[in-house]
Image: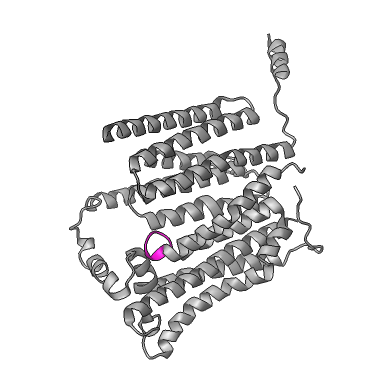
């Protein structure tokens, strides 16, 4: 509960913050809190990925981007009440939808009845890998992981193409000796 | 004695451990939390640390730009290639059970191969993105 | 005997959290970047070290304790190095530390 409150505080601080540098650091804090929340929910694989990508690489790459652009956000031209209303309505609908879900962690809910016992019982005999997350990710649902890898590949190629064409003329390596 | 001596020594001490930890996370993905994505990000973090402490030329000696840019599609190729091998040997796409003498072992090897592909692509992409951002700003 | 270890580990964990909280308060209340860095770094290193030590006592003799020992060593080694890097970056930006003479001069000018 305390983690969720901290998460909400971090999000509101991100929205209200004008300096982009502060926003980047707060985004790192948000990712770190999210990783802690995922550990509290017993999802360690996802927590590790979230911590390393969100609080590590994402912060570094965003700081490298800030190096290229201005460091303050533009003042919004008109007050944005309509987006706030839309966000509140959508959030309210989501909360109303999730209230009727079964309580967290109960073993005999409908969603845990068909696919999960199948994978849990057949992971070690069929693949020999004790970590069910890895066996589901890489073997039973390997096609989705192929899609994820292709997405990373496409994003990387896109960014590289965008940034390559505008490299400066004299790009011999002047390494910065601090 | 330059100003950042402490930083350079500290970085030199920790760098091999970062790489070893990345490989540990990669290969222990079968037994604990881990897998290709986390390991790729940690390996890219090592290269970024070299770039921050010793300069871009040192980082490019460790991970040359051409190699890194070739790594990005190579990982996807490894992954899809594993799938196609299954196709060529008579079964479905991404069916790993034909890769070895015994279906259980073959599936383990298939999982290792695809996680390797994910590692190559993720670390290559993160490092290439970092290089692209820093080169652009000079 | 196990009760003594339990109590000791809890004392260490509470002390560690206390030092970390003090570091956080110092981060907010200190006037200047260098003093803030000093407050955060010293208290965080001590607090973090005590926390990890307390967790080691909770875990007993197992693989987890060995891993925590390594994390402890890494933490003690690298928290000050990181602060050093931060201070170097601040010096590089030509941020002057606020000396006591300036504050006294400012306080006298305000009366």
Please, is residue C100 above or below residue A120 in the view? above
Q: Residue lying at the far left in this picture: please name it.
A: A108
Q: Horizontally, is A61 left or right of C16 in the view?
A: right
Q: Residue A71 or C77: which is nearer the viewer?
A: C77
Residue A33 point in image, percent of width and height = 43, 45
Q: In which quarter of the image is residue B65?
A: bottom right
Q: Residue at x 66, y 45 (%)?
A: B7
Q: Residue lying at the far front in this picture: please name it.
A: C1
Part of the protein shown in magenta: B29-35
Residue A82 visible: no
Q: Residue C4 or B63: which is nearer the viewer?
A: C4
Q: Which residue is drawn at 49% across and 27% down?
A: C22
Residue A99 point in image, percent of width and height = 25, 49
> Which is the main secondary structure of the residues drawn in magenta?
loop
Quarter of the figure with the N terminus of chain A: top left
Q: Residue lying at the far top in this picture: please name it.
A: C111
Residue C80 point in image, percent of width and height = 59, 38
Residue B103 point in image, percent of width and height = 33, 81
Please, is residue A8 above or below residue A122 in the view? above
Q: Residue A124 or B91: which is nearer the viewer?
A: A124
Q: Which residue is drawn at 32% across and 65% down?
A: A130
Query: Does the stretch in magenta take in B33?
Result: yes
Q: Horizontally, is B85 left or right of A129 in the view?
A: right
Please, is residue A35 above or below residue C10 in the view? below
Q: In which quarter of the image is residue B126?
A: bottom right
Query: Does the stretch in magenta take in B60?
Result: no
Please, is residue B54 above or below residue C95 in the view? below
Q: In which quarter of the image is residue B67?
A: bottom right
Residue B72 visible: yes
In this rendering, the count of numbered labels is: 0
């Amino acid at each position: 509960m305390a983690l969720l409150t901290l998460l909400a505080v971090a999000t509101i601080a991100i929205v209200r913050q004008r300096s982009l540098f502060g926003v980047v650091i707060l985004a790192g804090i948000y990712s770190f809190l999210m990783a802690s929340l995922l550990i509290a929910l017993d999802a360690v694989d996802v927590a590790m990925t979230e911590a390393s990508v969100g609080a590590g690489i994402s912060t570094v790459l965003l700081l490298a981007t800030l190096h290229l652009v201005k460091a303050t956000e533009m003042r919004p031209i008109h007050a944005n009440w309509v987006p706030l209303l839309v966000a509140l309505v959508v959030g309210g609908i989501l909360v109303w939808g999730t209230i009727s879900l079964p309580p967290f962690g109960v073993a005999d809910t409908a969603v845990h009845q068909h696919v999960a016992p199948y994978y849990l019982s057949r992971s070690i005999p069929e693949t020999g890998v004790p970590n069910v997350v890895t066996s589901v990710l890489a073997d039973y649902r390997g096609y989705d992981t192929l899609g994820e890898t292709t997405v990373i590949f496409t994003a990387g190629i896109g960014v590289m193409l965008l940034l390559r064409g505008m490299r400066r003329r004299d790009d011999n390596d002047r390494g910065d000796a601090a | 004695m330059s100003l950042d001596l402490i930083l350079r020594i500290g970085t030199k001490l920790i760098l091999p451990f970062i790489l070893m930890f990345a490989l540990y996370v990669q290969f222990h993905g079968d037994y604990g939390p881990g897998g290709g994505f986390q390991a790729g990000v940690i390996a890219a973090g090592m290269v970024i640390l070299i770039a921050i402490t010793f300069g871009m030329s040192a980082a490019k000696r460790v991970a040359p730009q051409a190699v890194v840019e070739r790594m990005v599609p190579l990982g996807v190729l490894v992954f899809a290639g594993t799938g196609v091998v299954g196709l060529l040997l008579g079964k479905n796409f991404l069916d790993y059970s034909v890769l070895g003498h015994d279906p259980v072992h073959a599936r383990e090897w298939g999982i290792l191969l695809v996680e390797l592909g994910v590692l190559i692509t993720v670390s290559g992409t993160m490092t290439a993105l970092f290089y692209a951002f820093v080169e652009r700003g000079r | 005997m196990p009760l003594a270890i339990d109590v000791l580990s809890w004392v260490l964990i509470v002390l560690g959290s206390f030092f970390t909280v003090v570091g956080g308060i110092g981060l907010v209340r200190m006037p200047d970047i260098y003093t803030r860095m000093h407050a955060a770094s010293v208290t965080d290193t001590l607090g973090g070290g005590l926390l990890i030590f307390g967790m080691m006592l909770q875990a007993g003799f197992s693989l987890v304790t060995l891993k925590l020992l390594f994390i402890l060593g890494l933490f003690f080694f690298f928290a000050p190095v990181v602060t050093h890097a931060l201070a170097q970056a601040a010096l590089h930006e030509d941020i002057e530390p606020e000396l006591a003479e300036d504050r006294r001069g400012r306080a006298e000018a305000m009366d």
